Image (cartoon, rainbow, N blue to C red):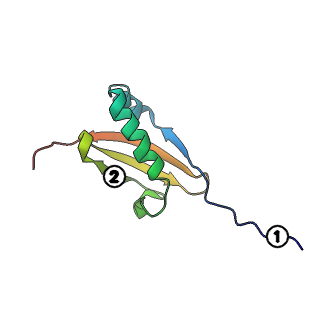
Amino acid sequence: MPQLHHRSQGPHRVHYAPQAWREVGRMPAETFAALQGVLERLGDAHLRAPEATGGRARHPVPQHGFELEYSWDERSRTLTLLGLVRVSHAP
């Protein structure tokens, strides 16, 4: 009897828009590692903002003083980092 295999969601691709590369290139290695971790986690639909599909969403990374601006394409399972916005640490 054939076995049914459920396809897992699997990994996703991350694409950096040109304007995002400018900011990424200025980051220290520790901050870049944190950025990569956040982008990996945003592949999970439970963490990703619903408006990211077909539009733009923001995700705060307060410990490093910026917000990510990103979009999600479900068909290609690609997260596109559109930009980084520096935010103030002040309350």
The reply to whether discs 1 and 2 touch (Cβ–Cβ < 8 Å) is no
* Residue 72 rendering spot, x and y as whole percentages: 49, 53
At label 2, counting other C-alpha atoms closer than 10 Å, the crowd grade (few under 14, some 14-19, many 20 or more) is some
Q: Residue at x 47, y 47 (%)?
A: 40
- Relative image position of residue 8 (x, y in whole percent): 64, 61
Could you tell me residue 66's position as x and y percent? 27, 42
Question: CA gap, disc 1 to disc 2?
Answer: 41 Å
Q: Residue at x 44, y 46 (%)?
A: 39
Question: How crowded is the residue under tag 1: few (<14 C-alpha within 10 Å), some, or many (20+)?
Answer: few
Q: Which mark is residue 58?
A: 2
What's under tag 1, amino acid-wise?
Gln
| Vertical position of residue 31 compared to residue 55: above or below | above
Q: Which amino acid does label 2 sit on?
A: Arg
Q: Tell me where residue 22 sits by quadrant.
A: top left
Left or right: 41 with respect to 34?
right
Q: Of helix, strand and loop, which one carries label 2?
A: strand
Q: In this view, does 85 lie above or below 76?
A: above
Secondary structure at badge 1 equals: loop
Vertical side of 27 occupied by 17: above or below: below
Instruction: Mark 1 or mark 2: name the one nearer the start of the chain.
Output: 1
83 or 47, nearer to the observer: 47
Q: Position of residue 91 (x, y in %)?
A: 9, 50
Query: Which residue is label 1 attached to?
Result: 3
Q: Which quadrant of the figure has residue 9? A: bottom right
Q: Which residue lies furthest to the left in this view?
A: 91
Q: Residue furthest right?
A: 1
